[in-house]
Image (cartoon, rainbow, N blue to C red):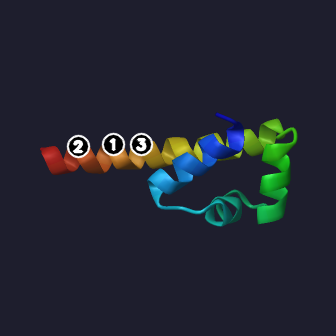
Amino acid sequence: MDLIKNIDSICRWRGLTLLNLAERIGISYLNLIDSIKGNPSITHLKRIANLVTKTLILFNTALDRKCH
């Protein structure tokens, strides 16, 4: 599976679009798509990873609170 499909799957799992993702990491939608399809910068990949990591932490925290 290529990178754009992986990122799109993660976004859909979170209920986001790629446009939402681009806005949250501070770049335009077209810049995000071009970057991912071409050669994404480390900065963009780190921003995406940080966003996903924060989401997973928040999800796990909410889940823990609900279970206890």
Drawn side of residue 50 relative to residue 37, left or right: left
Residue 3 image position (x, y, % from top left): 70, 38
Q: Secondary structure at mark 3?
A: helix
Q: Which residue is mark 1?
A: 60
| Mark 2 vs 3, N-terminal side | 3
Check contact, mark 3 vs mark 1: CB within 8 A. yes
Q: Circles 1 and 2: CB distance less than 8 Å?
A: yes
Q: Which residue is mark 2?
A: 64
Query: Which numbered disc covers residue 57?
Result: 3
Quarter-wise, where is residue 39 in the image? Answer: top right
Q: Residue furthest front?
A: 1
- What's under tag 2, amino acid-wise? Asp
Determine the residue positioned at 52% across, 41% down.
Answer: 53
Mark 2 and mark 3 in contact? Answer it, CB < 8 Å. Answer: no
Q: CA distance from mark 1 to mark 2?
A: 6 Å
Question: Could you tell me residue 52's position as x and y percent?
Answer: 54, 45
